[in-house]
Amino acid sequence: EVQVVESGGGLVQPGGSLRLSCTASGFTFSTYWMTWFRQAPGKGLEWVANTNQDGSAKYYVDSVKGRFTISRDNAENSVFLQMNSLRVEDTAVYYCARSVDYWGQGTLVTVSS
Amino acid sequence: QAGLTQPPSVSKGLRQTATLTCTGNSNNVGNQGAAWLRQHQGHPPKVLSYRNNNRPSGISERLSASRSGNTASLTITGLQPEDEADYYCSAWDTSLSAWLFGGGTKLTVL
């Protein structure tokens, strides 16, 4: 059974940093793109970043470019999202997904003073 | 990045058929097809279909996805109360190198 599980969310002050982790199982991790999405409170879904199978290609939504970094460790079946210079508007539930077809339960990131 | 276009709301009666639409362009929906997700209030999204009607295991056969040109559709037959939810479409845009989403359609089952 395909599973992705996020962790690392929490409360952080504006300008702070947070690192999200996602551990996958039930499929050959190294053969799939991995993606981070988010959903702000009461809002729709938004793509944040994704990376190809070996991590050599990475794409970001404009609003996080230069602040967020996606990376992966195929030996550990894990993908990460390093979030720096966090803003209030980054407050959201962050979801990890295998490409777009299997999503985790999400982890809440709250940016507030 | 600009998004895909979905109607904000659709209302249908119990046991009727609802067709939800998602319009993009030749760089996204028209090229790669669309994925469809359903989200009940307070729950994470669940993928219903991806890459032209590939259905994850456990998804009801009452749901089917299709595409015509730059518009993707999700058809739900025999509507049940549990079908009442927010439905989102998503597609990879080859020009923007970005996943785009529609704003979501709230389906109400009367």
Image (cartoon, coloured by chain):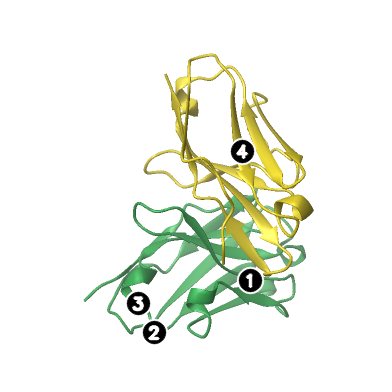
Chain colours: A green, B yellow
Residue B22: image location, x then y, percent: 62, 44
Q: Which of marks 2 and 4 is in front?
A: 4
Q: What residue type is labelled 4?
A: Thr
Q: What residue type is labelled 3?
A: Arg
Q: How far apart are marks 2 and 3 (CA)?
A: 7 Å
The answer to which image quadrant residue A79 occupies is bottom right
Q: Distance between the residues labelled 3 and 4?
A: 34 Å
Say which residue label 3 marks.
A87
Q: Do the residues labelled 2 and 4 touch (CB within 8 Å)?
A: no
Numbered-mark total: 4
Residue B3: image location, x then y, percent: 56, 57
Assess disc 4: are there few (<14), some (14-19) or many (≥20) residues with their C-alpha within 10 Å of its C-alpha: many
Q: Which amino acid does label 1 sit on?
A: Glu
Instruction: Quarter of the image for the N terminus of chain B: give it.
Output: bottom right
The residue depicted at 77 percent of the width and 64 percent of the height is A31
User: Counting residues from the N terminus, which is met first, the one under dot 2 or under dot 1?
Assistant: 1
Residue A60: image location, x then y, percent: 58, 74
Q: Which amino acid does label 2 sit on?
A: Ser
Say which residue label 2 marks.
A85
Q: Which of A95 and A27 is in front in this view?
A: A95
Q: Residue B21 carries which label?
A: 4
Q: Is mark 4 on a helix, strand or loop?
A: strand
Q: Which mark is residue A76?
A: 1
- Asked whether the residues under marks 3 and 4 belong to the same chain, the reply is no
- Asked whether the residues under marks 3 and 1 belong to the same chain, the reply is yes
Assess disc 3: are there few (<14), some (14-19) or many (≥20) residues with their C-alpha within 10 Å of its C-alpha: some
